[in-house]
Image (cartoon, rainbow, N blue to C red):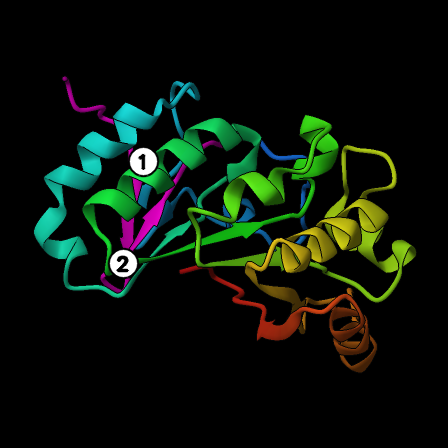
Amino acid sequence: MTESNENLLYFLDDKPYINMTNACTNACVFCVRNQKEDVQGAKLWLDEDNTSADDVIVQIESNKEKILKNKEIVFCGYGEPLIRVNEVIEIAKYLKENYPNLKIRINTNGHANAIHKRNVAQELAPYIDSISVSLNGENEEVYNKISNPKIENAYEETKRFIRACVEAKINTTASIVENVPNFPVDVERCCVIAKSLGAKFRSRDFIPNGY
């Protein structure tokens, strides 16, 4: 099996991340891909956005020793990983079978159920340990300004997905990004919404120059 020249697996502060696709149903104002083409030197724009599970697994095995030094691997790159949900599940299953001590997390915009017209959360639950969903705002107006979604009713779909993940018994966190210039967010209100959906809450600061 030939190894792809694309950076499907990359490291941020020596922690492993999987760059599944560049496709996304949001165009968030804070997204690091709007600021630069790489993360700590790894170019994450894909020349051919048709990644297979095997492509990723080859790169995982090529970096096995480095990965084994970590406690967690994260699906998070320059796109929405759950657009490629079947491949994500295949990779996560492989990781569970071959790296049983490695926790698996997905960072997502929460549109998966709307995209695939089914409850993706239930399918993910056997294979992943945690999921972080971008809540992004305290109401639809704020969410749309920050996220620029390409699907209808994106804010409500995101909240429904958060609840679906909680109900599937996945360790679920709803997240926002604070201090994005000209895009204020009501942090306390977002925290209340996250908890009302049964999720944990996380706020992180905007990183002006990326990673």
Q: Give the range drawn in magenta.
A: 1-22
Q: Are marks 2 and 1 in contact (CB under 8 Å)?
A: no
Name the amino acid type tagged 2.
Leu
Residue at image x 55%, y 58%? 170
> In the picture shown, does residue 192 fall above or below 53?
below
Q: Is mark 2 on a helix, strand or loop?
A: loop
Depth check: give the residue in front, 173 or 99.
99
Residue 9 visible (yes or no): yes
In the image, residue 197 above or below residue 191 = above
Q: Residue at x 37, y 46 (%)?
A: 38
- Identify the residue at image location x=75%, y=34%: 114
- Asked if residue 7 lies in the magenta stretch, the reply is yes
| Kind of residue at badge 1 | Leu
Tell whether 67 sits left or right of 53. left
Residue 160 location (% of width, % of height)? 78, 50
Residue shown at 38%/23% (left/top)? 51
Up/down of 86 relative to 11, above or below: above
Residue that badge 2 annotates: 102
Question: Residue 63 location in percent, x, y?
Answer: 13, 45
Coordinates of residue 14 in the picture (x, y in percent): 22, 62
Instruction: Write down the quadrant of residue 185 in the picture.
Output: bottom right
Residue 80 shows up from this direction? no
Local packing at callout 2 (Cα closer than 10 Å; few below 14, some 14-19, many 20+) is: some
Q: Is residue 188 left or right of residue 24?
A: right
- Separation of marks 2 and 1 at Cα, in angstroms: 18 Å
Among the 4 quarters of the image, the one containing residue 139:
bottom right
Residue pointed to by mark 1: 8
Judging depth in this view, the residue of 102 and 23 nearest the camera is 102
- Quarter that holds the C terminus: bottom left
